[in-house]
Amino acid sequence: MDWDKLRVFHAVAEAGSFTHAGDTLNLSQSAVSRQISALEEALQVPLFHRHARGLILTEQGEALNRTVREVFAKLAMTEALLTESKEKPAGRLKITTTVGFGTAWLAPRLQGFLDQYPDVSVTLLLDDADLDLAMREADVAIRMHPPKQPDLIQRHLMAMQWIVLASPDYLQRHGTPQRPEDLDNHKLILFGEYRPPVSDINWLAEAGRRAGSPRRALLEVNNVQAMSLAIRSGIGIGALPDYMANEMEGLTRLLPDLKSPKVDMFFVYPEELRNSKRVAVFRDFLLARLAEMQ
């Protein structure tokens, strides 16, 4: 199989159309179409179902694309390791983590890392779903749970706690809960159910209640930073992770003796990057900054 044709095939499979693949490869639509037709002729199997709205991989096309994706992932990882200087960290580092942690904690601290390692560039991918590190969707991940894949290296970073908060304006209008049971008489801000980044994120709904009978939220938001803004505006009471300490200024902490679920945070990366200097210095940077919170 011709490598150039496989490269074009992979681009078409990922883009779903000849036109979009051509834009990525800087080729005309007709040139892309000819390459795919030639590959199908050489293999003597159809790779795409063609229809008016685009292209769909055939069963044979799916099998070929899985293999080609793995090859591209391995090549990308090898290229990154080869271009990394033996003397100092260099190259691009793709980091993925949850939207909340990446927005509220990590992004504001990246300047310190980039100033310290000017030959490293960062791509930050924020998603509450886990990206596939084995397929090089990212190089490293900061996750709120242990990795599920057995071939990933993990390092425990910290145990996150939740803090119950309200604005002084809200408390002046509605009073201050003294016990978890008092939350029955208050307005709650909870996390929306779309891709919750950690389990038990809405633990406050059941605090002081019988299991299985949660309180209803007045407002649900699927982003913890937006939750902090809603709490600050006086809509209701909510729980925020302790790494958002800077977001909590001006808010009042409630029910300090209430025990919240513990969330363990992990730094995760593939075995192939065990000796990567970029990964090592970023891991150490994280550990140092998180230690400042303890």
Image (spheres, rainbow, N blue to C red):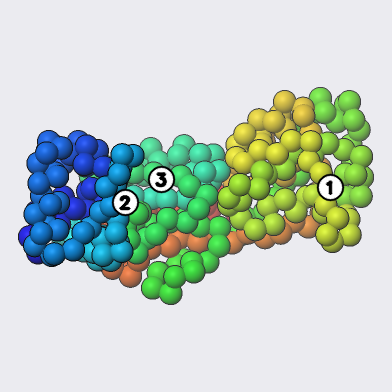
Q: Is residue 191 visible?
A: yes
10 vs 106, nearest the viewer: 10
Q: Which label number is shown at residue 215?
A: 1
Q: CA distance from mark 3 to mark 2?
A: 27 Å
Dot 3: within a 10 Å radius of its alpha carbon, few (fewer than 14), some, or many (20 or more) residues? some
Kindly identify the amino acid type of the residue bearing the numbered disc 1.
Arg
The label nearer to you, 3 versus 2, is 2
Q: Say whether residue 73 is left or right of residue 82.
A: right
Instruction: Name the residue beneath numbered marker 3.
Output: 125
Q: Nearer the viewer, residue 289 or 204?
A: 204
For image coordinates 90% across by 44% down, the residue present is 184
Q: Amino acid at mark 3?
A: Leu
Q: Can the viewer see residue 247 in this picture?
A: no
Q: Residue at x 55, y 43 (%)?
A: 100
- Circle 1: element type: loop
Gap in Å between the C-alphas at discs 3 and 1?
A: 33 Å
